[in-house]
Image: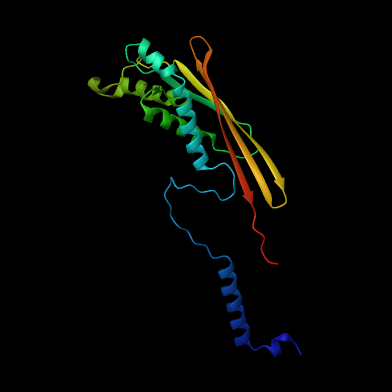
Amino acid sequence: MTLRHLFPARARLAAGALLLLSAGACFSKRVTRIEPTAVTDLSGRWNDTDSRLVANQLVEQTLAAGWAKRYTDQHGGEAPTVIVGTFANRTMEHIQVGTFVKDIERALITTGAARVVASSSERGELRDERKDQQQYSRADTRARPGQELGARYALTGELQAIEDVDGRERVVFYQVDASLVDLETNTKVWVGQHKIKKYVERARFGL
């Protein structure tokens, strides 16, 4: 006697539906919206919170070094111009360095102690726009060429990470190094770093 004879068609359909419902229950998903500034740490990896906090710390450190105030005092109250350059990712993780650079730019601009100029990639697009304006825009609304502010200082750096794993325990150590260089003299006017250390423990399930 086959299974088809042991289980009538209706019973087989009911069992199939139950299996589908069970599968759906196993893979159900719930999405909850939270504040973008909320501190979240699911994996222990570098995340948006780290990017924002480290950027704020580095900007606070560099302005505390006094180079911006000295420049302002020597130039009739004019704030120095800074370009935020490359921050190299030396870790084994896929880190969105571009987001980190933007966080640094935002933090610098917010302080009002320095002016941030556009990056080299951004400048190309802006110059094309100015060139286009000279031909097609009304004369009194055109952005004049040759009026760009040159950066006096360049802020660059790198991200490094060390990971130590033992069974269900993991420690991740991040170090972000940065330096500010006077573009006129190639003098490093500030060198700083910020460190993060995270302990991650995976829970044991079952007996």
Give the position of the N terminus as an image quadrant: bottom right
Q: Where is residue 23 drawn, in percent x and y? A: 60, 70
Q: Nearer the viewer, residue 170 or 42?
A: 170
153 lies left or right of 162: left
Q: Position of residue 87 (x, y in %)?
A: 55, 28
Taking the image as shown, residue 107 lies to the left or right of residue 97, namely: left
Please tell me whether residue 20 is drawn above or below residue 199 in the rendered image: below
Residue sticking out furthest to the left: 140
Quarter location, residue 192: top right
Q: Quadrant of the C terminus?
A: bottom right
Residue 179 sits above or below residue 200 on the image:
above
Closest to the observer: 18 or 169? Answer: 169
Please name the residue shown 48% across and 47% down the image. Answer: 39
How many numbered circles does the render carry?
0
At 40% across and 14% down in the image, what residue appears? 71
Colour setting: rainbow
Residue 124 placement, left or right of 1 = left
Task: Give the residue drawn at x 31%, y 17%.
Answer: 144
Which quadrant of the figure has residue 78?
top left
Rendered view: 39 above or below 140:
below
- Outermost residue toward the right in this view: 1
The x, y position of residue 124, in whole percent, is 44, 23
Residue 92 is situated, as x and y percent measured from the top left of the image, at 65, 38
